[in-house]
Amino acid sequence: DVKVTQSSRYLVKRTGEKVFLECVQDMDHENMFWYRQDPGLGLRLIYFSYDVKMKEKGDIPEGYSVSREKKERFSLILESASTNQTSMYLCANSGRGTETQYFGPGTRLLVL
Amino acid sequence: EDQVTQSPEALRLQEGESSSLNCSYTVSGLRGLFWYRQDPGKGPEFLFTLYSAGEEKEKERLKATLTKKESFLHITAPKPEDSATYLCAGVYNQGGKLIFGQGTELSVKP
């Protein structure tokens, strides 16, 4: 089975803190994605990566950065957390040349 | 701009009452249409991929179909455990990003 794990299910941080969200997949998939999901706005793509050390901006990259040092690991970084970054964060992955994405369990982040 | 739109936003059914969820999409350039199930507080779970008009896929009480301009998720004799939000998504370039609809929240009462 495809397994995607995220470092935390729930996280509470203070405004201005640097936040790291980590995603690990064990399927040897090349493509990895970070989304955020908000009521009424659906899933929105933040960043994605097609290979190690590669990254591309999605639809809403402002206030975020990413790191992909190893194939199986894709990290989302909130440089200086703000209250409008309170959301559910979802990591996904897919194989090279395929479109089916498999999602992790999500991290619910609250920024106070 | 490529778009995916789902209807209705919410659907309440009695156990055993069959119905359909709709997903309409920007036609030009669609490479694939996906259906996911999402339970509260969890990540989306992959259900089906459809690639061409006329294609159908089935899994238990669910059947997904694709026409030239929309997709349907048919639910036959639903049970309370089918209650979830169902998401539809389209992909418009190879290996590219999914564009999600807003989802349909399905509630099945016993």
Image (cartoon, grey):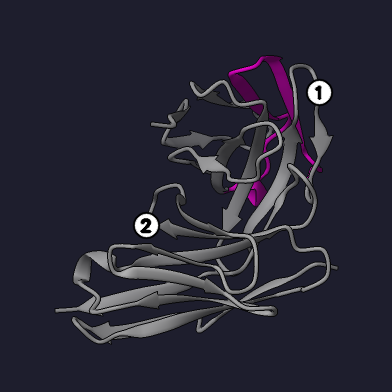
What's the chain of the residue with tag 2?
B
Q: Nearer the viewer, residue B36 or B109?
A: B36
Give the SS element for disc 1.
loop
Residue drawn 72% across and 32% down?
Answer: A80
| Residue A111 appears in the rendering | no
Q: Quadrant of residue A82?
A: top right
| Residue B98 appears in the rendering | yes
Residue drawn 19% across and 83% down?
Answer: B16
Is residue A30 on the magenta stretch?
A: no
From the viewer's perspective, is B10 left or right of A42? Answer: left
What's under tag 2, amino acid-wise?
Pro
Position of residue B33 measured from the top left corner of the image (x, y, whole percent):
62, 62
- Disc 2 to disc 1, C-alpha distance: 32 Å
Give the SS element for disc 2.
loop
Asked if the residues shown at circle 2 and circle 1 are in contact, with their CB atoms under 8 angstroms apart, the answer is: no
The C terminus of chain A lies in quadrant: top right
Residue drawn 67% across and 26% down?
Answer: A30
Position of residue A10 measured from the top left corner of the image (x, y, whole percent):
42, 37
Is residue A66 on the magenta stretch?
A: yes
Q: Which residue is mark 1?
A: A54
**For the view shown, which residue lies furthest in the left direction?**
B110
From the viewer's perspective, is B104 left or right of A20? Answer: left
The residue carrying pointer 2 sits among few (fewer than 14), some (14 to 19) or many (20 or more) residues within 10 Å by Cα, namely few
What's under tag 1, amino acid-wise?
Met
**For the view shown, which residue lies furthest in the front direction?**
B54
Position of residue B26 measured from the top left corner of the image (x, y, whole percent):
77, 73
Q: Is residue A15 above or below residue A42?
A: above
Look at the image and give the residue range highlighted in magenta: A61-86
What's the chain of the residue with tag 1?
A
Q: Which mark is residue B40?
A: 2
The residue carrying pointer 1 sits among few (fewer than 14), some (14 to 19) or many (20 or more) residues within 10 Å by Cα, namely few
